[in-house]
Image (cartoon, rainbow, N blue to C red):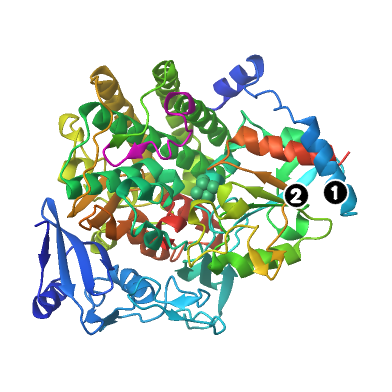
Amino acid sequence: MLWPSLAKNLISRPLTDPAPATRPEEVAALAAMLEASARRRLGRSLAIRQVDAGSCNGCELEINATQNVVHDLERFGLRFVASPRHADVLLVTGPVTRNMREALERTRAATPEPCFIVAVGDCAIDGGVFKGSYAVEGGLAAETRPGEAMMRPDIRIPGCPPTPTQIIQGLLTLLAAQE
Amino acid sequence: MIRKNLSATKWQALARSSPPLLAMWADPTTIYAAFMDGAAPQLVSCPAPDGRFASFSAQHPAAAWFERAIQDLWGLEAVGSIDGRPWLDHGRWPVLNPMSSRPVRHGSAPPQPEFLEALGAGVHQIAVGPVHAGIIEPGHFRFHVVGETLVRLEARLGYTHKGTLGLMLGKSPRAAARFPARLSGDSTVAHSLAFALAAEQAAGITAPPRAVAMRAAMAEIERIANHLNDWGFICNDAAFPAVHARTGVLREALLRACHVAFGHRLMMDRVLPGGVATDIAAGGLGLIADALASIEAELPALERITASHASLQDRLVSTGIIAPGLAALLNAGGVVGRASGRAVDARAVPGYAPYDELEVVPITRTEGDVAARLAVRQDEIRESLRMLHIIAAGMPEGEIMTALPGRAGEGFALVEGFRGECFCWLRLDDGGLIQAAFLRDPSWLHWPLLEAAVQGNIVADFPLINKSINGSYSGVDL
Ligand code: SF4
């Protein structure tokens, strides 16, 4: 039965980690960048749509782990939504395969403004180990039009894959820069 | 010679005899296949000088996907194939047949995909993906439904095709190891191990005993972490998040222990050709032992909770049945095969060190439903815990890496990952660089079974059935 363990949980200490610290200089830099792009700021609650643009699924495992009770992403007002039409943030993973590029661009087009882009993992930043393959664009930094990057991420969270703590840290930086 | 080179006539005879197929692949001039021959995997090949070979797919439905991928990547045509549609190539690469000796430039607009039909009164289609609603990999599902009942599902994959095989060519096994490690991130240890064993066979060396034991420990930890994850997500998809919360806690502690012990939560890039990258860090073993002890302690309660809630069992039992005959026809291994009565486990047969000393007995069920697949996972967590106790107690001291000589050779390996058997084959040139390679995730033989498993179920049970099979997208997209 579930009841005994639920009752035990009521009296035991919470399992959740303390919030990871953000770096003031990163927050200030991002705030300045958001200011310069003249995008409307959002409050302390952001809806996130995750888009796998061809990852190896390692990044998805760690993004999923941000939602477990130890990391508990939702306590920061950050939650995942099922449709880009409901999202403030696109969390992109993978090297942007040629087979996923159009789907990613369409997802971006379906997201209302202001839309914040977060590149999660080395692949999403510049293609990672898959850079140079015939099958990938090379992450969000790839020049898909002359002189123009595919999508300019507001935050880059490097790692292969980044840990859940690093992913939360990046998202908290985005939250802090909204203030 | 680890492989038999067949004449075109012999190949054709083999195609008609429908052997239990593991994989098919190619290089620019030759077609290859691996199948089980009793207890041992058999490798065969056949030159295809005119770019054509006899198809296996009429006798063996699982061959169709391999043959479509071979056509797309290497440009070799399967004569007599039951399905000539492109697979990995969505018409968006800058070249055609990128792995052939002469890729052609390509610039026309991508074609509309064609799907298999379902006809009848009231049949309509639902198109889902490639971007899905959850945090999962991309793929397209085309459902044909009548009311809420699924009549036909066809999966269209290939969206995560990264050109992994092409990136491995011309590199030393050491430099190429990061690609099998990223074929499917959740199976990073298993695919890295299959690749390492194949490279070691090709180079004529074996890893030191300590590395062999560490690899097995990592592989069993990976199995437990993934089985916990699947257990949690299956319950979550059946609207029972309490189990998911607890498996998440147990899994997180295990991954943190791995971070300390091996320097990476998923143990990526730790298994290398010749051995392992780093020894276990101080304090790491204790943390892993603690995490495993918590899992062992909570297993009975979690199993009880899963088994005793009628609302949960109602969703799991008799949902998404894969008949044993169908699993056998597809030669499906892993959890999916074992839950449909197939007593297969690469750790037992063909077996590899150190499992010969661990008495692996495949865990099977015969019901073939979501509940059976979950039950197999639960029992396998217990078995992995048992093996980890033995591995830890007998962990040898000594070297963790043997240098790979730069020489020509060919090797293959079959390693039991958490989904099933991961196959790797490779050939090294005179300088010891990779001349040709193939990596096969067990999901190649599971995805077609998902299409069968959903038939007659309601649309709302699809996520649950899909989760219980948990095919890897990246693993088959290459
Ligand atoms: S960054 Fe690493 S873990 Fe993430 S998708 Fe790329 S290869 Fe996989």
Residue type, mark 2 in image:
Asp
Residue type, mark 1 in image:
Leu
Q: Main secondary structure of the magenta part?
A: loop
Label number found at residue A154: 2
Q: Nearer the viewer, residue B316 or B362?
A: B362
Secondary structure of the residue carrying tag 2 is loop
Q: Quadrant of residue B64?
A: bottom left
Q: Position of residue B286 (x, y in %)?
A: 41, 15
Quadrant location of the C terminus of chain B in the rendered image: bottom left
Q: Kindly identify which residue carries mark 1.
A: A34
Q: Chain of mark 1?
A: A
**Range drawn in magenta:** B259-274
Q: Is residue A57 visible?
A: no
A155 lies left or right of B6: right
Crowd class of label 2 (few under 14; some 14 to 19; many from 20; radius 10 Å): some
Q: Nearer the viewer, residue B206 or B35?
A: B206
Whether residues under marks 2 and 1 lie with C-beta atoms below 8 angstroms apart, the answer is yes
Secondary structure of the residue carrying tag 1 is helix
Residue at 25 percent across and 56 percent down: it is: B426
